[in-house]
Image (spheres, rainbow, N blue to C red):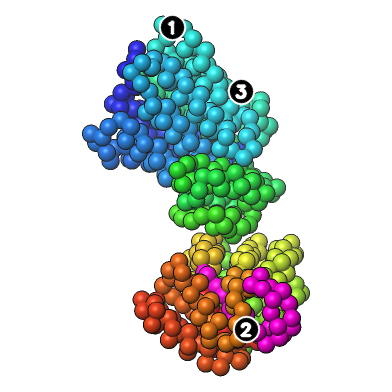
Amino acid sequence: MAGGIELDTVLRFVDIAVDALAEAREEIDALNVYPVPDGDTGTNMYLTIAAARDAIRELPGSPKRAALAAFSRGALLGARGNSGVILSEMMGAIARRIAAATDDDRNAEVMAEALRRATEASYAAVGEPVEGTMLTVARAASDAAAEAVKDPAARTADVLRTAAAAAREALGHTPEQLPVLAEAGVVDAGGRGICVILDAAETVLTGRRPVPVTHPLGQHAIPVPQLAPAGAGDLSTEGPSYEVMYLLDTDDGQIPHLRSRLGELGDSVVVVGGDRLWNVHVHVDDVGAAIEAGLEIGRPHRIRVTHFAEQVAASSADAPRTPAPAGRSVIAVSAGPGLHALFEEAGAIVVDGGPGRRPSTGQLLAAIEGSGAQEIVILPNDPDSVRAARVAASTAESDGAGAGAGHALRISVIPTEAQVQGLAAIAVHEPGRAFDQDVTEMTATARHVKHGAVTVAVKEAMTSAGPCAPGDVLGVIAGDFVVIGDDLGEVAIAVLERLLAAGGELVTLVQGEEADGIAERAVSWVEEHHPHVDAVVYDGGQERYPLLISVE
């Protein structure tokens, strides 16, 4: 049969698939022990397909190509968790192949090719593919479909029936491929989800459902080994503690570098998408670093962070309840008395620093220990202090410094490299929200601050802006010298011009010990040339830098 797979068929499939996953999600959640036993694979796959269904249903009467594009994008935007992100890539590959079919294409061949492309896309999306997972089950289905379609008389229904049967067979063998499944006495959760989806596709074309067998958790189509109850598995202490997901607007050419960087930070790396919109998933210990990897190349949004230990506890009805953390502290390094007061007024524990007197690891560790908090955010506010802060944080977490009985200490170092970045980050600090969300907001805000400064040369040197002599006024942007002059105000304005070239809404000026009216001149220039931009001035009292500048 040719003429293309009808849109009505696709619509019936998504409805049946959503209903089937809704029915099976508790069962699938209970199977979930790999890569992390967080009990949410069924829910994530259900939410991903439901988002795709909602997207295609919002375009009634649309041409098939437009509807399938909406389906693909809906899956991408709605993907949840490792399994959901992989599933979204598979669904996108299938939708693109169906949309590209011509009247001369044989439908059975289109479906077999779509399943092959889905498998290839899923393997390509994963940083380090592991067998005995949903990838293996998908490959078994596509390989079987490729064999079935060799029969010239094979119909689309025959291809899907064969593929679904092969998937169920492969699922039964996943414990032989992945020891963690055998130890828990379960099959792979994501693979089970793939079987549910293929069964739904078979049902659409044949009107028949696979004959179920009785199982302690309900009815389903394959024999499954003895299941451990949800939450019964111990969360491995060897794996990362957090799942980080976000959508990322970036050039497609940046993705190989991103996958590599995330692979250095953690595991379960899955990055899928295209046309400048990507869905990013990774398991890490350093939440901030995972988000920064996206910030370096584009705009992350819809950021979600999950702490696995909390999720596992929440999934078990018998999980013991633990008291809330004792509190959260922000530790900030300041470069002057005025800046010290600003950070202190914002609620931070302040460690004095600045050029020539940057804090040691020991001083930062003492601040951590003295805080008595369970959750700590550190703002180094200087590139040379970032490493000291990270070493102090690692030492404190290993020693359990500051942690109350029964609670692990959680520390996040936000790598702020300028005082004004720290001010921006602490301005959005909200101790009442979840720690991961607070760190996410502070990190994103700090990274979006464009920052500069004005200083005075103390010796002859060759800079990135050319040679300078003692007494020359130097304009700095993001740590690089960009302007050399002889007037503080003129250099400040030159720096502002560059920082505001791409737009901005708020200019923050922090005047130092020898400001000489430089801040007032800068404010006047902003009011004249950028009347819609707000400007605020603080007395920072910092040495060596008459003016610190930021644009948000």
Q: Specify the segment rendered in magenta.
A: 449-474
Residue 227, percent from left and from top: 57, 32
Residue 300 located within the stretch drawn in magenta: no
Q: Residue furthest left?
A: 61
Q: Residue at x 30, y 27 (%)?
A: 7
Q: Residue at x 36, y 36 (%)?
A: 69
Q: Amino acid at mark 2?
A: Val
Tag on residue 473?
2
Q: Work out whether residue 92 or residue 426 is closer to the camera in this orientation and state it.
A: 92
Question: Residue at label 1?
Answer: 152
Query: Which quadrant holds residue 97?
Result: top left
Residue 315, percent from left and from top: 52, 47
The reply to whether residue 184 is in sight is no
Residues under labels 3 and 2: Cα distance?
71 Å
101 lies above or below 433: above
369 lies above or below 84: below
Tag on residue 173?
3
**Label 1 packing within 10 angstroms: few (<14), some (14-19), many (20+):** few
Q: Amino acid at mark 3?
A: His
Secondary structure under tag 2 reads strand
